[in-house]
Image (spheres, rainbow, N blue to C red):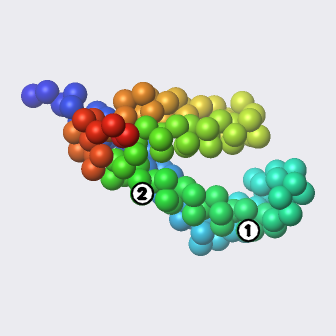
């Protein structure tokens, strides 16, 4: 039995679940997340930490939904890769940052792979 063809969809849906979970928790309870927002972001944007958490939560839920269904997979993978890079730049190579490096590398893999056989925008389309 050849299971190799399922690897891209398992990776894509697994990462989508992670971002969906984090995004939803940010939308339901910002107080848990405000301590992670760098002061520089609030001072530069003028947004409160709570507002920034909500914006980030919406971004993550939206990106996770696209990723789960395999819509614009390469673009979504690249944007989430950059998102994780920014998070790692902030938290550093702490245990949390090292875990996030693993997620970031998985997103890079998705960016390289693009759509798979189970994507709504599959591998034969121009923009995956």
Which quadrant would residue 7 be assigned to in this image? top left
The answer to whether residue 117 is left or right of residue 56 is: left
The percent position of residue 104, horizontal first and vertical second, equals 55, 34
Tell me what residue is drawn at x 22 percent, y 39 percent.
Answer: 117
Q: Is residue 13 above or below residue 24?
A: above
The answer to whether residue 21 is left or right of residue 89 is: left
Tell me what residue is drawn at x 48 percent, y 35 percent.
Answer: 107
Circle count: 2
What element does badge 2 sit on?
helix
> Foreground: 67 or 96?
67
Going from N to C along the chain, the mark reached first, 2 or 1, is 1
The percent position of residue 18, horizontal first and vertical second, equals 48, 50
Q: Residues within 10 Å of mark 2 (few under 14, many from 20)?
A: some
The answer to whether residue 14 is left or right of residue 39 is: left
Residue denoted by label 1: 51
What element does badge 1 sit on?
helix
The percent position of residue 100, horizontal first and vertical second, equals 60, 37
Q: Is residue 81 above or below residue 69?
A: above
Q: Which residue extends farthest bottom?
A: 28
Q: Which residue extends farthest front?
A: 126
Location of the C terminus (image quadrant): top left
């Amino acid at each position: 039995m050849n299971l190799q063809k399922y690897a891209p969809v398992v990776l894509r849906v697994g990462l989508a679940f992670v971002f969906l979970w984090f995004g939803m928790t940010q939308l339901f309870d910002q107080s848990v997340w405000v301590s992670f927002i760098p002061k520089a972001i609030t001072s530069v944007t003028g947004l409160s930490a709570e507002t920034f958490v909500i914006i980030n939560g919406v971004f993550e839920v939206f990106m996770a939904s696209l990723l789960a269904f395999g819509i614009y997979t390469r673009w979504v993978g690249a944007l989430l890769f950059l998102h994780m890079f920014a998070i790692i730049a902030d938290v550093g190579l702490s245990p949390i940052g090292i875990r996030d490096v693993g997620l970031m590398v998985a997103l890079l893999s998705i960016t390289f792979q693009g759509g798979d056989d189970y994507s709504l925008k599959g591998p034969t389309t121009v923009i995956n």
